[in-house]
Amino acid sequence: MRVRTLAVALLASGLALTACGKEGSPGEGTPAPTQAVAQDVKVEGSPTFDKIKSRGKVIIGVKEDQPGLGLKDSKTGKFTGFDIEIAKLIAAKLGFTEDKIEYKAIASAGREQALINGDVDYYVGTYTINAKRKEQIGFAGPYFTAGQDLLVRKGDDSIKGPDTLKGKKVCSVTGSTPIQYVKTNALTEPENILEFQNYSQCVQQLDQGAVDAVTTDDAILKGYASLEPDKFRVVGKPFTKEPYGVGLAKDDKALRTKINDILDEAISGSAWQQIYDATLGKSGSSADKPVIDRY
Amino acid sequence: MDVLLDNLDLYGPGFLDTVELFLLSGTGALVLGVVLAMLRVSPVPVLRAAGATYVTIVRNTPLTLVFFFFAFAFPLLGIVNTRDFGSYYFVAAVIALTLYTAAFVCEVMRAGINTVPVGQAEASRALGLTFGQMLGSVVLPQALRAVVPPMVSTLNALLKNTTIAAGFSVFQAGSISLNLAERGEDQLVGLAWVALFFVVLVIPMTLLQRSLEKRWSIAR
């Protein structure tokens, strides 16, 4: 009996400790537009599409811990956010209704391998297009252009941009591009750089005053700021360009062209704007439409 | 090879910090573990209970949670000011690894103590040695000889456990693959190098184990 009490106590404390993430999502309220599902879609010469067809459903890699972009509701298990709506839009135009979509949450470090192994058909989750990644996988898009920015406490006016970070504690995810940028450009001293497993841990440290700024793409930061607008603000001076693309198998040119067409149509039409307004747009800031980069 | 050579700035410091973490927390765990083992075999019931409680709780807590406590919960207690304490997270990692591994070292030592015949303890008490003298000069030296292989295994596990610190603001070998992913390098190759370096780190420990086993073997 004593053992059981102890086990329960340990389990409870374990759950309490790990449940540190912030809940809620800015995507609630006005729902994102539903997309008309295309019929009889054909993508000639695409092995991925053939696989999706024979499987009868599409498996999409997403993020589950980024408010406003890709967030899994811990109660309902539903995914919400800008990236999720883009993923849904692509699926619809490929001929798959929402119930034929399976989301797989994959963290940043595992994305290339998941695509190479074919664990996911395509990946939509704050995935910056760059040359080095293109050697391993393919990119459609960009469907959004973000830029590295800073999240600070609302009352803190001492941080105005990247050059005012000296002597300030800066937090981001272990090994992530934004923290590597801070390191290589020596924006702050090495002992003032903190790296944790996810952004919500950094945001929590920011709230507690253990760090002064959280840095990553403005899209992600806007998501956190819109959750608690009276606590945090985004500095609003993006200092890099991060074009978000849809990750694909490297050699699947046919599917890449198809997804580029889908995105192009959504951007030139009204679908993209509607999706933005229903998700990230709720933080109050507007965004420029991206230009598809076909290669 | 390219993945290694292009990213020496990650591999070099990464593995240096891993070794540093390992040596510091390994020493700490050995000392604390032996003390705990002494508690667990002591004639005082309260001390025995304290040792048993420590081992039961810590051994059943996932290491990540121990780290979590020191990285996120402990600073909230306001005992240390993490802002003025530059290397706080490194020290926190050493403490977390030490406390966690000590529980395992304790059990290994206790197993060793149990291999020493009771008669020896009784004989040394009959000679007038105190409990401390009995443990220090009769029981522990013999126990230590018996536990070389499991002790090295425990330390080996500690070496690999250091990688968990990557998620808690300590740059070491575990952070390498996370950094590589963002640099767009091939992660399988990158991880293969990490694995190889771990093998290189483990080999001296294995050699030490062999030589100690040979030198300390007792005919029973």
Image (cartoon, helix red, strand yellow):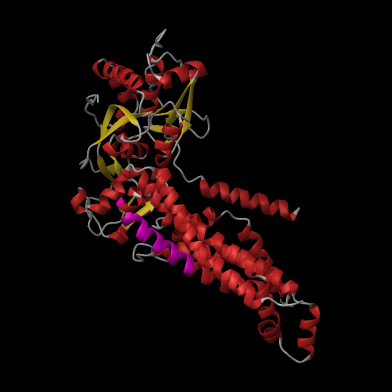
Q: Is residue A66 visible?
A: no
- Count numbered badges in the picture: 0
User: Is A133 above or below relative to A39?
Assistant: below
Expressed as whole percent of the image width and height from the top left, the position of residue B176 reads 39, 52
Q: Residue furthest top?
A: A40
Where residue B16 sits, quadrant-wise, is bottom left
Expressed as whole percent of the image width and height from the top left, the position of residue A17 reads 52, 50
Is residue A88 shown left or right of residue B47? left
B152, B1: nearer the viewer = B1
Q: Is residue A83 magenta?
A: no
Where residue A67 sits, quadrant-wise, is top left
Expressed as whole percent of the image width and height from the top left, the position of residue B188 reads 43, 43
Secondary structure predominantly adopted by residues drawn in magenta? helix
B14, B3: nearer the viewer = B3
Is residue A110 shown left or right of residue A231? right
Q: Residue at x 33, y 22 (%)?
A: A253
From which residue to which does the magenta span run? B6-23
Q: Is residue B15 magenta?
A: yes
Q: Residue furthest bottom?
A: B128
Q: Residue at x 66, y 67 (%)?
A: B108
Expressed as whole percent of the image width and height from the top left, the position of residue A221 reads 32, 40
Q: Which part of the image, by quadrant, shows the C terminus of chain B? A: bottom right
Q: Residue furthest left?
A: A163
Q: Is residue B185 visible?
A: yes
B197, A157: nearer the viewer = B197
